[in-house]
Image (cartoon, rainbow, N blue to C red):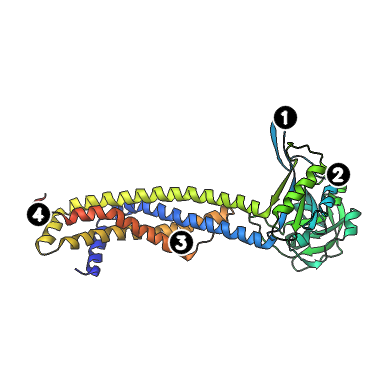
Amino acid sequence: MSIIMTLRIALKALNRNKMRTMLTMLGMIIGVGAVITMVALGKGAQTTIEEQVKAAGTNLINIQSGNFSQGGVRMGQGMLNTLMPEDAEALRDVPGVQYVAAGANTRGQVVNGNQNWSTNTEGTDVDMPLIRSWPTKYGSFFSPQDVSSAAKVAVLGSLVSDTLFGPDVDPTGQMIRIRNQPFRVVGVMSSKGQSGTGQDQDDIVFVPYTTVIKKLQGQQHIQRIQVSAETPDVAPVAAAITEVLRTRHKLMPGDPDDFMVRTLEEMAAVRSETARTMGTLLAAIAGVSLLVGGIGIMNIMLVSVTERTREIGLRMAIGARGKDVLLQFLVEAVVLSLFGGIIGIGFGFGLAEAAERFLQWPTTIPANAIAMAFGFAAATGVFFGFYPARKAARLDPIEALRFE
């Protein structure tokens, strides 16, 4: 019997009980959908991390204040002010260091006339655009003199500029107010888009870090230091930075660091591990769902063999061979799996879209993920459909015809 005829018979058999067919496919739909979602989330996270590393460069090193135990409580990064501007200046003399930028953040209203916007005001140094490979669109970044004098000058992110002054408007020289203090706009950064965590990098205002700590916060400490090494081999530089800061902070051997040094590769590794953990969870869900779906297919095919025993006996009595019956039921199982796989792929696309829209998690669905989903579906159909198909093929025609 031809494969076309076998396929037609399989479709007619599945069409006899649509509700049972749909319920049987449910496990396959969930399993394949989970496979698609797993690949989409994992690939999206990997792509984002690669783009971040490419954009920032593998030679980036971040130093955050804090990171030691106090009274038995582990104090996380940024919870304690342990870094000083002098620490940043000292790091400029570390071998292998190319650029250094001290940093201190605050948040508040930025106002231009009757337009206002609540955003982050990032205090930084003149090396920041070089460290982050971020040019200006209008004007220029502030100068070393602005930093040393704690000048009230600001460089706007493109989103803030568009909000306060309108799109495609050069606001250089205009006055704005940050936390009710006047600042002169000296430049606008080019658009950089979202970060890997979904944060809009253009929703920001840059001012000298000295201005933040002296005139907006009224303190002397900084929150972080960004360093760019001369080469991608940042491990020796990070070790040297750690040694310099421990010496400056008068930490004894055995004392924990009161700061945290992280390279971009380490931060990327943490995010990759998060993506892998989520991928493992989804893989487990997919595996269980495919197993349940496969068992459901096997059970329904066994029921179908029992219900159609007389039909099988009649076909074998008029010349159908055992392998013809085997092929027929195997095709039915595979068709059931593939239909579930097709619906599951659509379900997976929907889940991936929902994750990107509502969870701000980037997703990418490569073409090979669809092929892999089809492969899983077909393999499940063959594996779990073989036993019922073999049982049908081994029926005795005479006994089958007597079956009531």
Q: Residues within 10 Å of mark 1 (few under 14, many from 20)?
A: few
Q: Nearer the viewer, residue 17 or 271?
A: 271
**Amino acid type assigned to the residue bearing label 4 in the image:** Leu
Residue 71: assigned label: 1
Sequence-first tag of 1 and 3: 1
Residue that badge 2 annotates = 220
**Alpha carbon of mark 1 to alpha carbon of mark 2: how far?**
25 Å
Front position among marks 1 and 4: 1
Sequence-first tag of 1 and 2: 1
Secondary structure of the residue carrying tag 2 is loop
**Amino acid type assigned to the residue bearing label 1 in the image:** Gly
Residue that badge 4 annotates = 401
Residue 369: assigned label: 3
Residue 404: assigned label: none
Pointer 2 and pointer 3: residues touching (CB < 8 Å)? Answer: no
Q: Name the image quarter holding the N terminus.
A: bottom left
